[in-house]
Amino acid sequence: QSVLTQPPSASGTPGQRVTISCSGGASNIGGRTVNWYQHLPGRAPKLLIYTDNQRPSGVPDRFSGSKSGTSASLAISGLQSEDEGDYYCSAWDDSLHGWVFGGGTKLTVL
Amino acid sequence: EVQLVESGGGLVKPGGSLRLSCAASGFTFNNYIMNWVRQAPGKGLEWVASISASKYYIYYSDSVKGRFTISRDNAKNSLSLQMNSLTVEDTAVYYCIREGRFCRGGVCSNWFDSWGQGTLVTVSS
């Protein structure tokens, strides 16, 4: 059971917009910033969004992040086949004194 | 270019020990917090341990506390993870990770900005 809660799966057709939710608590998302990671098949995980809504250089603006209270969301617009993979939210937890991850959301491009 | 190269993975019996290493290059190693994160087969990402640049702050997940030891050699740009009393639940790909950080007005935000390719640890009899 992960500290952060994500839906196990999401899907969309090419060009569509999909959102992935991440729910936590006051000791993590509620008081800390949220990061999102993309894990594509056969590759190492990669930073996708940091500090709730910032994109590292090289990440397309199709990817965006938001946070409200103890929940966060990742939105992917203009869905592409190469976006298919696993997506994880993460935050530091002040009660656990460690990083926590969501269980991951498997994105399928239909 | 930031490079993180893990080594030391392999097959070990339950109760055994293994030491993972991570060679870092392309950045000023002693300026960064470093972490280990793992992924068990068919499971999600799990944070394992963190060590500050000065080695003063060290944190472990509850699942490895007392069995694993994270360390670093800033002179050699190297991160290590000593794993003892291994169980089958420790079977995973272990990633070496650099932690980025930005502070403003006394408030800091952190993230995992660079990941190695991972090294597989298999615990099996």
Image: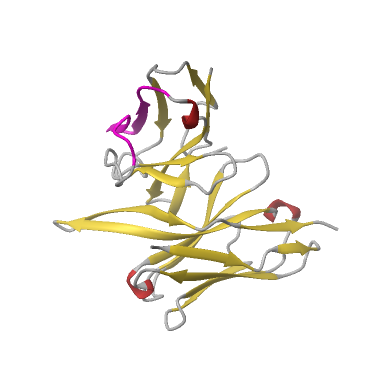
Q: How is the image coloured?
A: secondary structure
Query: Does the segment drawn in magenta span residue A37?
Result: no
Residue A97 visible? The answer is no
Total labels: the figure holds 0
As displayed, is residue B8 above or below residue B45?
Answer: below
As displayed, is residue A45 above or below residue B26?
Answer: above
Can you give x and y, in whole percent of width and height, for residue A70 in the image? 33, 34
Q: Which residues are magenta?
A: A59-79
Residue B77 lies in what quarter of the image? bottom left
What residue is at 78 percent from the left and 64 percent from the top? B12
Q: Quadrant of the C terminus of chain B?
A: bottom right
Left or right relative to B46: residue B58: left
Q: Quadrant of the N terminus of chain B?
A: bottom left
As displayed, is residue B57 above or below residue A7?
Answer: below
Left or right relative to B115: residue B27: left
The residue positioned farthest toward the left in the image shown: B105
What residue is at 41 percent from the left and 31 percent from the top? A23
Left or right relative to B66: residue A48: left
Query: Does the segment drawn in magenta span residue A65?
Result: yes
